[in-house]
Structure formats: structure tokens, C-alpha cells
Amino acid sequence: MRCCHKCSAEWTGEKKPAFRALCPKCSADIHCCLNCRLYDPGAHNKCRSRTTEMVADREKANFCDEFDFADSAGQRQTGAPGSKPRWDSLWR
């Protein structure tokens, strides 16, 4: 289940939301790092992709082409700062 990072409301829209898509419940940006499967606070630039650019505000909309909506909060990485990124999970 894909959910908003801010209010946990279920996202029933398209799997790859538009860059400016908003949560219908709380109006939070949907196409943002905090909703992405690649987001990892312990990784360089807080992203498990090696090709993305630095994003200053992770909860705001961005134009990242590698955005992949996390299927659940459990799929998002929550590693401690400085923890090693899980590169192997990118190749599954």
C-alpha cells in the first residue's frame, strides 16, 4: 500500500505520481524523497541511487526521474545517520 509520508493516508492515484501531485487528505507533496523507495537517511545524499543530485528539502516536491513510490512505510529505509546503505536491495 502506498501512503503519504506526512499523514499516512493511502495514495490511490497513479504508481508514479506527477511531480506536483498532492495528498488529497493533508496536501503534502507526494513526489518527494520521503515517499520514495530509494530514500535512506544513512546513504550519501540520503538516497540509495548513485546518480541522483542532492535534494535540499526531502519533504517537498522534486523532479527526480528515479522516484519509485515506496509500497509501504516499511519499504522506506530508516537507517541511522552514518549507517551503510543497502546497495544489494537495488538489484533485486
Image: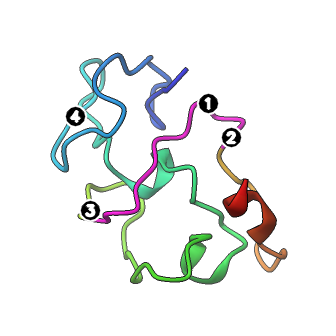
Query: For the point 57% across and 59% down, which residue is it?
Result: 38
The reply to whether discs 2 and 1 touch (Cβ–Cβ < 8 Å) is yes
Chosen colour scheme = rainbow
Helix, strand or loop for disc 1: loop
Q: Which residues are magenta?
A: 64-75
Q: What residue does disc 2 label?
A: 75
Q: Answer with the quarter of the image where residue 82 lies.
A: bottom right
- Residue on which disc 3 sits: 62
Q: Nearer the viewer, residue 24 or 53?
A: 53
Dot label at residue 22: 4
In the rendered structure, which amino acid carries the disc numbered 3? Asn
Q: Residues within 10 Å of mark 1 (few under 14, many from 20)?
A: some
> How far separated are the C-alphas under marks 4 and 2?
21 Å
- 70 with respect to 11 (left or right): right
Q: Is residue 67 above or below residue 57?
A: above
Q: CA distance from mark 3 to mark 1?
A: 20 Å
- The quarter of the rendered structure image containing the N terminus is top right
Pointer 1: what residue?
72
Front disc: 1 or 4 = 1
Mark 1: amino acid? Ser
Position in image of residue 3 (x %, y %): 48, 26
Q: Residue at x 72, y 36 (%)?
A: 74
Separation of residues labelled 3 and 2 (CA atoms)? 20 Å
Q: Is residue 80 visible?
A: no
Mark 1 to mark 4 CA distance (whole Å): 17 Å
Furthest residue in direction left, as rendered: 20
SS assignment for the magenta stretch, majority: loop
Point out residue 71 in the picture as x, y percentages from the top left corner. Answer: 57, 31
Q: What element does badge 4 sit on? A: loop
87 or 41, which lies in front? 87
Amino acid type at mark 2:
Gln
Instruction: Name which residue type carries label 4.
Output: Leu
